[in-house]
Image: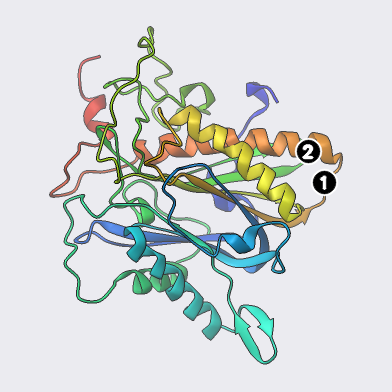
């Protein structure tokens, strides 16, 4: 799959995968929020966890040998362990709408989720009642085919090494007629940019000027082993890659695993003991595979490219807010280079 063959979907969002919807909800005083991916029908889902400090809900059931093979929604949230309650708000709202795995006369919505740590970002965290259940329900209610990036949803209070993180998304058309998209909340221990400049590590995979069009710097820094760029327990990048291909849960897991390469291309370093880095995969099943071997190869490679681009877009689109402990990427752009 050569670069000249790559083009984005019409929105350059994960919702270019037909049938998917994404909703954000955030509280800017809290400096945190939640993002939900859902669809009108249950979809195949899987997960790959490579970080050393994940925070998750219902990820064990995503293994290929489990009974339930499809889910109703996936949540990404700030709030550390408190943010896992966002999935409860989503599940409550889905149940009220008659959605969920059927057990007798009951419906049990299947809502896996993952969280990032944003409790020390300058926001007001002295709540008396966990706000994330309400944020989850609000994000589901807002779900549609267009949604905000940057300082929005689960990326509202995200931070990386030396620069604000954010919520990113991207899509690509794949030979064979498939679409692949990525959605990510970037809150990494590592850096999305080369040194302290404005160039993104993900630049080789940029399509057009979707995150500034700067390319890579003329000279890359010498390899080194820097100390952690932020608090050792204050990181995690959580993502979803999706396709309209008809995949089994095992095939979706392979796509999620391949997509982890995109995280490593865009964040240096990635998958540290202090990050909870993980990637969910979602497959709507609208398009059957032609040649399974070739198609799975292309889908995995496309997912990695999409995730790298989505990470850079999330940081690129972050915006300043009162009380931020870190500058935005836009501030770096204004410096002499």
Label pair 1/2, CB-CB below 8 angstroms: yes
The residue furthest left is 323
In the picture, residue 328 is in which quadrant?
top left
Q: Circle 1 is placed at which residue position?
A: 289
**SS at circle 1:** loop
Which residue is identified by label 2?
295
Which residue is at a point 29% across and 73% down the rendered structure image? Answer: 130
Seen at 17% across and 45% down, the residue is 324
46 shown above or below 101: above
The colour scheme used here is rainbow
Task: Decide: few, some or many residues near mark 1? Use Cα within 10 Å; few <14, some 14-19, many ≥20.
Answer: some
Placement of 337 over or under 279, stated as above or below = above
Residue shown at the point (53%, 58%) measured from the top left: 145
Q: Position of residue 222 (x, y in %)?
A: 36, 9
Residue at position x 16%, y 67% from top?
A: 126
Q: Find numbered disc 2 in the image and state the secondary structure of the residue it sits on.
A: helix
């Amino acid at each position: 799959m050569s670069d000249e063959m790559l083009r984005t979907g019409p929105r350059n969002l994960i919702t270019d995968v037909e049938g998917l919807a994404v909703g954000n909800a955030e509280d800017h005083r809290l400096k945190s929020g939640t993002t939900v991916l859902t669809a009108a029908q249950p979809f195949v889902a899987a997960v790959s966890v490579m970080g050393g400090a994940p925070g998750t809900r219902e990820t064990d059931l995503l293994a290929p040998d489990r009974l339930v093979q499809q889910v109703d929604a996936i949540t990404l949230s700030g709030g550390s362990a408190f943010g896992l309650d966002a999935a409860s708000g989503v599940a409550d709202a889905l149940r009220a709408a008659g959605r969920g795995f059927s057990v007798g006369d009951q419906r049990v919505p299947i809502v896996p989720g993952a969280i990032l740590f944003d409790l020390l970002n300058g926001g007001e965290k002295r709540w008396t009642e966990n706000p994330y259940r309400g944020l989850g329900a609000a994000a589901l209610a807002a779900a549609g085919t267009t949604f905000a990036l940057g300082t929005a949803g689960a990326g509202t209070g995200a931070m990386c090494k030396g620069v604000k993180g954010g919520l990113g998304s991207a899509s690509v058309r794949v030979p064979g007629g498939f679409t692949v998209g990525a959605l990510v909340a970037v809150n990494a221990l590592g850096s999305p940019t080369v040194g302290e400049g404005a160039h993104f590590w993900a630049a080789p995979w940029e399509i057009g000027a979707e995150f500034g069009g700067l390319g890579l710097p003329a000279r890359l820094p010498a390899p080194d082993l820097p100390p952690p760029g932020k608090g050792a327990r204050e990181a995690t990048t959580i993502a979803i890659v999706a396709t309209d291909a008809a995949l089994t849960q095992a095939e979706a897991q392979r796509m999620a695993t391949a997509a982890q390469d995109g995280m490593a291309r865009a964040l240096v370093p990635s998958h540290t003991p202090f990050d909870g880095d993980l990637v969910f995969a979602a497959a709507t099943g609208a398009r059957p595979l032609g040649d399974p071997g070739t198609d799975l190869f292309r889908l995995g490679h496309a997912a990695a490219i999409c995730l790298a681009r989505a990470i850079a877009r999330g940081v690129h689109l972050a915006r300043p807010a009162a009380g931020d402990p870190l500058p935005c990427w836009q501030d770096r752009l204004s410096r002499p280079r």
